[in-house]
Image (spheres, rainbow, N blue to C red):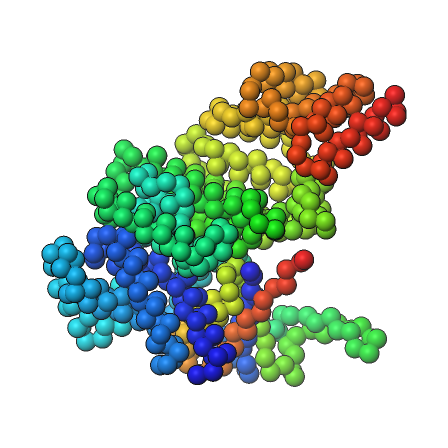
Amino acid sequence: MRYLINVIHEGELDESSAPAQLFEDMGAYVGKLAADGVLVDGAGLEPTEKATRVVLNQGDVKTVDGPFAEAKEWVGGYFLVQCRSQAEAVEIAKGSIEIHRKNVPDWNVVHEVRRIIDEE
Amino acid sequence: MSRAQADVVSETVEAVWRMESAKIIAVLARTVNDVGLAEELASDAVVAAIEQWPEDGVPDRPAAWLMVTAKRRAVDRIRRDQNLKTKYARVATELEASGQTEDPIAHAESELDDDIGDELLRVIFCACHPVLTVEARTALTLKAAAGLTTGEIARAYLTGEPTVAQRIVRAKRKLQKAGVTFEAPTAAEFGERLEAVLEVVYLIFNEGYTATGGGELMRPELCEDAQRLAQRLTALMPDQPEVLGLAALLDFQASRTRARIDAHGDPVPLPEQDRTKWDRLLIRRGLATLHRTSTSSEDPGPYRLQAAIAACHARAFKAEETDWRRIAGLYSRLLSVQPSPVVALNRAVAFGLAFGPQTGLDLLDQLADVSSLKDYHLVPAVRGEMLERLGRKAAAATEFDHAAELTDNERERAQLRRRAASLRAGL
C-alpha cells in the first residue's frame, strides 16, 4: 500500500531561519527511509511565493500567482512511502515530526497521512 | 481502553515491529551470538507490548522499549533455564548491566542508532543458510529480516499459523544443531551465500507476483515485502551489482502490476499491456538503482542482465519502440551465464523481433531437441507467430493448433484456435 505524507506548515514561516541541523536531520531521515525500503519518492517544495494556482470558481477560470494572502496552511514537502499499513505510515510521519520538534519547536507542523487509492 | 483503541495499539505494535524488528534482532544477536534466540527474545518483547501498551499507552520510543524489554526477558530466561544459564553466563551479566544503566531506554536507542549494517547482514545470511530448506529460509527471512509476523507469513503462503511457527522453530533448531551461531560468510563462500539470499528474495516476490495458489492472481503485499527486502539489501551491500540488479528487476516487474491482468482477471502479455498503467515511480527507482551498477567492472550476472532487459521494456512508451536489438544481445549474455531452455526460447523471440522472423525460426529449430520444451505450448505459439510474419499462413495455423493442444489455459486455447482459424480463412 502506498501513502502520501504531506508535510503541512501553518502560519507564516521564515524557512531561512531554520537551523541547518533540521535539514541535516531530515536528509538523514530520508536516507533511513530509503535504506529501510519504504521510500518511493519524496521532496521539498519551493515556497508558495513561487507557486501558481489555476482556479475554477463558479465556471470562471483564473490563474493566481503566489504568495496567497489568505492561505494559513501550505504544503512544504511530501513523502511517498510504500508500507504494509496506515499505522506504519503514521509511525514514519511521527519520526519526521520528532525531528521538527527537536529542531524547530516553535513551528506548527502537520503531517497528513493519506492512503493512495489503488485501481481495482 | 475501548476495543477500537486496542486495535490501534495492536496495529502500532505491528508497525513498530515491521520497522524495527530486524534491527532489534540484529543488536540482540550480537549480544547472545545466536540469531534464533535473538528472534525469540524480540518476539517475547512483542508479546509483552501487546499486553502492556493497551494498558499503559504506546511508549514514546517504542523501538527502544522493545529492546529493553527483550533484554530483561533474556535475563529472566537465562536465570530460569539451566541450559541457557551455562551457555549464556557471560551474556547474562552484560545484559543485566545494560539494563541497569541510568537510562536504559536511551542506552537502547543509541544501540539501535549505531551502524549495525554488519549485524543486519549476518541475520539475513544466517536466515538463508544452506543447511536450511528453501522453505525454511523463506519463513525465517520474512520473520527475522522483513518484520512479518507468523500470522502474516501464514496468510501470504495460504497456510496455517501453526505450520509457519513450526517451520520457524525447526529452522532455528537446525541452525543450532549445525552450529550456525551468528557469523558472517567467509570471503570464499560469500558469492554462493549471497546467491542464496537473493534467491529467497526473488522467490518471495514471485510467490506474490504469480500467486500459485488461492483465488487471486497476485498477492501484492508479498511483492512489496520482497521489494522492501531488496531495497534494504542495496543499502547494506551498495557495491554488489547483483543486489542492485535484483532490486531494480523487482521494481520493473512490480511497475507492471496494474497492467498485467485484465478486467476478467486474465494475464495480459507484455506487448499488449496499457503502458500508461505502468508505475513510473517504480520504473524511475529501478532505473536509478540499475544505473548504479554501470561503474562496476564485473561481468553482469543474471539479475543485472534480467534487470537490463526489463529496463529496455520500461523505457519504451510504446511496444513498437522497444529496443529489440539490445534485448537480443542481453539475452545472449543471459543465456551464457544462466543457460536454461526458457531463456533460450526468449532469446529466439528477441532475435526474431530484432533481426527478422527467419533468424528467430533458425534459433527455435536449435531448441527442437530440448526435452523440457517438448510440451511447452509457447514454442509452437512463437513459431506460429514467426511463420505468420513470413507469410506462411498454413504452416503458422498448424503451429497455433499445436500450441492450443498443449496449453492448459482455456482462454489461451480459444485464442490460439481463433488465430489458426482466421489464418486458414485467409488462405
Indicate whether B366 appears above or below B65.
above
> Does residue B118 appear in the picture of this structure?
no
User: Taking A88 as reference, is B330 above or below it?
Assistant: above
Residue B276 vs residue B90, the one in the foreground: B90
- Locate the N terminus of chain A and report the quarter of the image it occupies: bottom right
B313 versus A58 height, above or below:
above
Q: Quadrant of residue B411?
A: top right
Q: Is residue B136 left or right of residue B342?
A: left
* Quarter of the image that includes the C terminus of chain A: bottom right
Percent across and percent down for residue B86 are: 11, 56
Q: For the point 58% across and 66% down, which residue is it? A: A115
Residue occupying image coordinates x 32% and y 38%? B130
- Residue B203 in view: yes
Instruction: Determine the residue positioned at 44% across, 45% down.
Output: B201
Give x and y (percent) for residue A12: 55, 82
Query: Which sits in the foreground, A30 or B277?
Result: B277
